[in-house]
Image: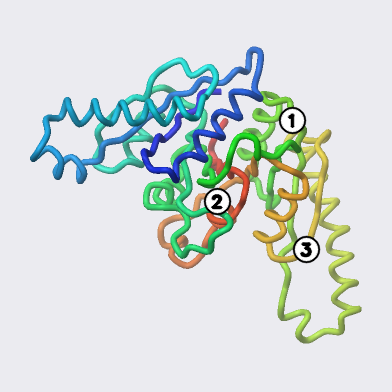
Amino acid sequence: MKWIIGVDLRETAAGALHFAGWLAENTAGTARPEFVPVHVLEESYLLQVLRHQHIDAVEDLARRAATDQLDRAQIGGLSQPAKIVRGVVADEALVREFDAVHGDALIIGRQAPASERNLVRLGRVARRLVRKLPCPTVVVPPDLRRDAVGKGPIMLATDLEETAGSAARFALRLSHATGRPLVVAHIVPADSDMSRYLPDATVDQFLSQSGLDREKDLKAWMANHGLESAAAIVSHGDVIARLTSIAEVEGSPMIVCGSRGMGTLERMFITSVGTDLSCWARAAVAMVPPTWGQ
């Protein structure tokens, strides 16, 4: 697989580079990954610094700083130095490079560590990429280190909709490349109003039956997407809390989820599961557009 790495010169980008290093160590043979590190000089930044320095000097300083970041991350098999590009905004420039080299996925860092309750979680570039999701995008916590990446299976989160088929294809390909098994998780959202008006025994009975029905639905969905050999988990509760908890218990190095392809207006009122996972998960989160791999 060909991975484009968004190289940020801040310390919050370290997690993305460590995760790339983990991919290099855990992918072998014909599936060995190729990395294309890219650092973007945004127009707003250039308008400030070009008053004092020539563009060649600015690019040289950026190249050296990016190279230092990559050297410290020690990404095995890195075949090229960081590419310095100019762009109006970083997210559009990264997507342009992704398209130019026919990439498979983009790796970027998240702003806030999982252990902190910062109001701003993703950062401007990650937030814009997650909102538009022009390509498979992996968001990595800033404090993730290579030796702390989970040793368990790749986790695929599904809502059982057909739009999650692209995520299934991506997760299966990553599973084959890394030699990690797959676990597929489906969460039945908790209905707080139900527990408010019904006896606990009735609620428990309903959830139990619902789980049995959803387990059958999940197995059918998995068979339809070539995932018969994967483990399956059905659970109830808050979707994000349960998915992140399952990923931690399983030791998953990555959570893969799909996107419903919501428009701008929808996203004003509804946050997607992928967006929330990318904000809060301790593991890397891959979000895959519904048309990927078709």
Dot label at residue 180: 1
For the point 24% across and 25% down, the residue is 60
* Residue 9 appears in the figure: yes
Q: Amino acid at mark 1?
A: Arg
Q: Is residue 193 above or below residue 204?
A: below
User: On the rendered structure, is 235 left or right of 97?
Assistant: right
Q: Secondary structure at mark 3?
A: strand
In percent of width and height, residue 162 lies at 65, 45
For mark 3, what is the residue?
A: 236
* Residue 137 appears in the figure: no
Dot label at residue 278: 2
Quarter-wise, where is residue 210 in the image?
Answer: bottom right
Whole-angstrom CA distance, mark 3 to mark 2, is: 20 Å
Q: Secondary structure at mark 1?
A: loop
- Lower position in the chain sequence, tag 1 or tag 2: 1
Badge 1: residue crowd in 10 Å (few <14, some 14–19, many ≥20): some
Quarter-wise, where is residue 290 in the image?
Answer: top right
Badge 2: residue crowd in 10 Å (few <14, some 14–19, many ≥20): many
Quarter-wise, where is residue 86 in the image?
Answer: top left
Q: Amino acid at mark 3?
A: His
User: On the rendered structure, is 128 left or right of 145?
Assistant: left
For the point 63% across and 45% down, the residue is 164
Q: Amino acid at mark 2?
A: Ser
